[in-house]
Image: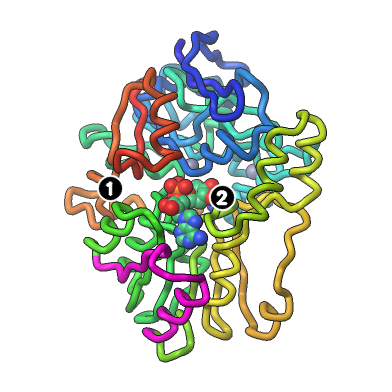
Amino acid sequence: MKAVTWQGKRDVRVEEVPDPKIQEPTDAVIRVTSAGLCGSDLHLYEVLTPFMTPGDILGHEPMGIVEEVGAEVPGLKPGDRVVVPFQIACGHCFMCGTGLPTQCETTQVTGEGMGAALFGYTRLYGAVPGGQAEYLRVPQAQYGPIKVPDGPPDDRFVYLSDVLPTAWQAVAYADVPQGGSIAVLGLGPIGDMACRVAQLKGAGRVFGVDLVPERLRRARERGVETYDLRSFDSEKELVAAIRDETGGRGPDAVIDAVGTEAHGSAAAKLVQQGAAVLPRAIGGRLAERFSVDRLAALYTAIDLVRRGGTISLSGVYGGMADPMPMLTLFDKQIQLRMGQANVRRWSDDILPYLTEEDPLGVDDFATHRVPLTDAPHAYETFQKKRDGAVKVLLKP
Ligand SMILES: NC(=O)c1ccc[n+]([C@@H]2O[C@H](COP(=O)([O-])OP(=O)(O)OC[C@H]3O[C@@H](n4cnc5c(N)ncnc54)[C@H](O)[C@@H]3O)[C@@H](O)[C@H]2O)c1
Ligand SMILES: [Zn+2]
Ligand SMILES: [Zn+2]
């Protein structure tokens, strides 16, 4: 089959690889019909290079049709249409039982000290072959795959794998009071969708910040009060402008939907790039043990949120020695909540909104739908934010 493989920094290629097979009785194999490209894939493309192995199959946002199931997957049969969550979880351990499949005790990558295995996401997360491919082996298929109805286009459901539950969890963790205010930093797919979910859940005012014109425009068209970071001399000024709109206090909650590759700090960028060009072993250790994060967005969130408010981090961070302004966090009494999205924790709450009325605008959320074989170009376009690329779906 054809699959998108990682070959090196900023080097992905579509290659012929062996078809996946059922290996465990709890496996399924699906024929992938759509697979999203995610901001998280861009971290692999560039800064998480030390944790990748050439040939790794990328992708964690797939949906498709069940081809084959193992003996212990009673709920699925060939022909079923399913969306596959980006994390692999068993559904019956203590963590899955408390609604935290990202911490599944059956699939935790204990050798690396990490939580549940993820599709297509470095050896830290189990080096599991990903879903940007014609076929995908789905471990723990008795729990993960979400069955969806036949009929509507893939676009209606594909974001259940990651974007929707991530945005949903970001808003749930932000815990905005009814009619309250929320600022979303970063208007990529995750931030854009988080704005939509916040509106749906009754936030009074939603502020959105980015520095890419068409991303700002998309949010503005749906009623978000947008701020272009480039039009301020410093983050301080941006913070002051949003504070002015919120009685001088700052919003009740801030979602950081940017993560480690924030624009804003030149010095940290050098350290981070250093980690990506060092020899693999040293680079890996450096990236794990020392700060590799660019913290501009997180610092803005800490400054911006009102006293006693909540910061909800969905952007991915990976450093070990990041300087945190503990005095401010403590003094402002900030609540900080974060983590990978627990997909099955939220998927049943989201499904009722994936209807003809399309309140979240999923049907035209994708800006690009391209053949799998165009993946190398799609990665570059998405990373460089060219050509209006916000959400790209690969079509095997
Ligand atoms: N927690 C989870 O489960 C989960 C799931 C999916 C994605 N993520 C993470 O969420 C983040 C966003 O993902 P995405 O797919 O939307 O990616 P993306 O890279 O398209 O979006 C990031 C956006 O942030 C903007 N940005 C950069 N610096 C900024 C700053 N200082 N202030 C405001 N905006 C800034 C960029 O212009 C871009 O539009 C990534 O870190 C990704 O890894 C987390
Ligand atoms: Zn993703
Ligand atoms: Zn589990």
The span shown in magenta is: 223-245
Residue that appears at 46% across and 40% down: 38
Q: Nearer the viewer, residue 151 or 213?
A: 213
Sequence-wise, the earlier of marks 1 and 2 is: 2
248 versus 117 height, above or below? below
The amino acid type found where label 2 is placed reads Glu
How many residues crowd mark 1 within 10 Å: few (<14), some (14–19), many (20+)? some
The extreme left residue here reads: 357
Q: Nearer the viewer, residue 301 or 142?
A: 301
81 versus 357 height, above or below? above
Q: CA distance from mark 1 to mark 2?
A: 26 Å
Question: Which quadrant of the figure has residue 335?
Answer: bottom right
Residue 362's disc number: 1
The amino acid type found where label 1 is placed reads Val
SS at mark 2? loop
Q: Position of residue 376 (x, y in %)?
A: 44, 24
Residue 261's disc number: 2
Residue 230's disc number: none
Q: Position of residue 68 (x, y in %)?
A: 46, 17
Where in the image, quadrant-wise, is ligand 3 located?
top right
The extreme front residue here reads: 233
Q: Is residue 324 visible?
A: yes
Q: Is residue 106 visible?
A: no
Question: Which quadrant of the figure has residue 247?
Answer: bottom left
187 versus 203 height, above or below? above
Residue that appears at 60% across and 34% down: 121
Residue that appears at 70% across and 33% down: 277
Q: Position of residue 112 (x, y in %)?
A: 78, 38
In the image, is the residue at mark 2 within 8 Å of ligand 1 by its beta carbon?
A: yes
Q: Position of residue 79 (x, y in %)?
A: 34, 22
As for residue 229 lying within the magenta part, the answer is: yes
